[in-house]
Image (cartoon, rainbow, N blue to C red):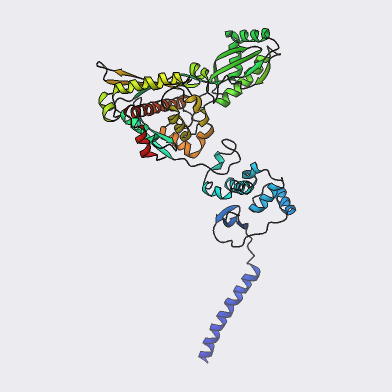
């Protein structure tokens, strides 16, 4: 009997627990609702994964791919209802592009993913042009396209990796500078680096002697009488003050410093010269010029503005006006190189360097009718630094204007004095390509990224001095190679073709 009672008690306890759980489940537990939205996706590039509440996790959870694109009407309805095409696959987006519902240049914005937009554009253009395989060697992934869109490039299909070398350190005005140079020319960085070594004992002294970005519009009048009257009016100091006030009102940094007015028949060419802070400044100068011209029209209503740029600027083309008057930063550098360094590092003599420099850079350039080309290869160094630091490479045309001078120095004339004069270095540390990550990193190496905190324009001036000092190093090394007959040998060592 006791055994039966014990077993019965155990069963009763179990039954009570089961009953309690049943009551809890029926009356107290409620189904839990989740706000988590999970969406599987896969692009035509092979990327697949899930989106949880809009957050993308790339993995292999999603195995199923929508191989057959939905009909045009359905895709268009989804696009119009959502305002974006991020929930359409690549093939469906391409259908809408082909049908004209999506503009190809807006793909990054439409799919709400810049990298994916670039990838789709590559597919479209590669198919149309018949060179899809060529894109395999042009990278496009893992790049911050947010810095590019609306600022640096349109219809983007990738980015161009260019080798970057370091020359230096260059001892410039008492500071050691490591100079980044982006180039595909073998021997250029090595040669510039040798020049930096030769300059390390006494260093390079540099000065910015003028600063003024220019914009030169062309206007026209009904007669030479009216054109000459307007020219005389603009050249009066009291009227310049009024023009300057209108120009300066367009920017916190752009400041008009002078006007150059030239007449050609009924045409006037007006060269506005202004400082622009740490920006290269073409946009600032253009904006200020436009407003200033409208102000002048209040006095000369018959003045016809033909073009905001009349080539009297002169931008991105050989021009004597830039060589004579300057444009951007006008910089001069000089250095003393002891005789023993000329012999041990440069492998030549002071007399040979001076002789070749006169014959090549002065007489030879004069025979060629060169404008601003009284140098050995300033454009090489300028362009390499420009590409590395996010400048406009096309502005190497004017920025490479340079006169290289060499002369014996010291009591016995055994040492060498070398200088480079560059009147038109067009350069900036903010705006344009300077904001791209790699280019900004190179500006960081030089300590000149962005605007100067306390002295607007100082970072751009410093970068201009670095360019001129680096050109001097490159000039010194190449001229030494020419004087000693080592040019071909060194190029064959670093560049076989």
User: In the displayed structure, would residue 402 be above or below residue 223?
Assistant: below
Q: Which residue is at a point 57% across and 44% down the rendered structure image?
A: 157
Residue nearest the viewer, comparing 441 with 361:
361
Count of numbered labels shown in the rendering:
0
* Residue 207 can be seen in this image: no
Task: Relative to 187, say whether 142 is above or below.
Answer: below
Q: Quadrant of residue 286?
A: top right
Tell me where residue 358 appears, x and y as whole percent: 37, 19
Is the residue 464 above or below the residue 166 in the image?
A: above
Look at the picture and state if 170 lies above or below 109.
above
- Tell me if residue 294 can be seen: yes
Q: Is residue 203 left or right of residue 113?
A: left
Q: Splitting the image into 4 quarters, where does residue 404 fall?
A: top left
Q: Nearer the viewer, residue 77 or 311?
A: 311
Q: Residue at x 67, y 20 (%)?
A: 306
Q: Give whichever of 366, 447 is nearer the camera.
A: 366
The C terminus sits in image quarter: top left
Measured from the top left, where is residue 74 in percent x and y? 73, 54
Q: Quadrant of residue 261?
A: top right
In the rendered view, does 339 fall on the left or right side of 306? left
- Which residue is at a point 35% across and 35% down the rendered structure image? 490
Q: Position of residue 113 (x, y in %)?
A: 60, 47
């Amino acid at each position: 009997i006791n055994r039966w009672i014990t077993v019965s008690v155990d069963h009763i306890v179990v039954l009570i627990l089961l009953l309690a759980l049943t009551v809890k489940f029926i009356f107290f537990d409620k189904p839990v609702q989740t706000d988590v939205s999970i969406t599987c996706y896969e692009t035509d590039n092979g990327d697949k994964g899930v989106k949880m509440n809009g957050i993308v996790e790339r993995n292999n959870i999603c195995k199923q791919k929508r191989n057959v694109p939905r009909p045009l009407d359905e895709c268009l309805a989804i696009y119009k209802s959502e305002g974006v095409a991020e929930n359409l696959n690549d093939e469906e987006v391409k259908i809408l592009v082909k049908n004209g519902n999506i503009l190809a240049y807006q793909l990054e914005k439409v799919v709400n993913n810049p990298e994916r937009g670039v990838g789709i554009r590559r597919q479209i253009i590669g198919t149309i042009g018949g060179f899809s395989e060529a894109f395999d060697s042009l990278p496009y992934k893992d790049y911050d396209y947010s810095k590019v869109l609306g600022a640096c490039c349109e219809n983007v299909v990738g980015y161009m990796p260019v080798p970057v070398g370091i020359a230096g350190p260059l001892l410039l005005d008492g500071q050691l500078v490591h100079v980044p140079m982006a180039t595909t020319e073998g021997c250029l960085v090595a040669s510039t680096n040798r020049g930096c070594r030769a300059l390390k004992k006494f260093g390079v002294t540099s000065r910015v002697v003028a600063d003024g970005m220019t914009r030169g519009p062309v206007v026209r009048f009904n007669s030479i009488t009216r054109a000459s009257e307007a020219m005389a009016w603009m050249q009066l100091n009291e009227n310049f003050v009024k023009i300057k006030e209108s120009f300066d009102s367009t920017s916190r940094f752009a400041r008009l410093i002078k006007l150059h007015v030239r007449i050609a028949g009924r045409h006037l060419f007006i060269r506005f010269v202004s400082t622009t802070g740490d920006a290269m400044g073409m946009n600032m100068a253009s904006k200020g010029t436009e407003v200033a011209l409208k102000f002048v029209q209040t006095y000369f209503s018959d003045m016809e503005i033909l073009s905001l740029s009349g080539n009297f600027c002169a931008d991105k083309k050989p021009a004597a006006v830039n060589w004579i008057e300057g444009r951007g930063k006008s910089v001069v550098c000089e250095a003393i190189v002891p005789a023993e360094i000329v012999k041990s590092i440069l492998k030549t003599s002071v007399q040979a360097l001076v002789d070749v420099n006169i014959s090549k850079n002065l007489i030879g350039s004069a025979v060629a009718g060169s404008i601003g080309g009284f140098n050995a290869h300033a454009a090489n160094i300028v362009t390499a630094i420009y590409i590395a630091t996010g400048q406009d490479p096309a502005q190497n045309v004017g920025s490479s204007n340079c006169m290289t001078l060499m002369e014996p120095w010291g009591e016995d004339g055994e040492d060498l004095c070398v200088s480079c004069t560059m009147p038109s270095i067009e350069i900036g540390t903010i705006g344009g390509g300077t904001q791209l990550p790699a280019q900004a990193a190179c500006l960081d190496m030089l300590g000149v990224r962005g605007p100067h905190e306390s002295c607007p324009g100082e970072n751009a001036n410093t970068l201009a001095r670095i360019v001129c000092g680096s050109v001097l190093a490159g000039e010194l090394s190449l001229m030494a190679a020419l004087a000693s007959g080592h040019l071909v040998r060194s190029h064959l060592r670093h560049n076989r073709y």
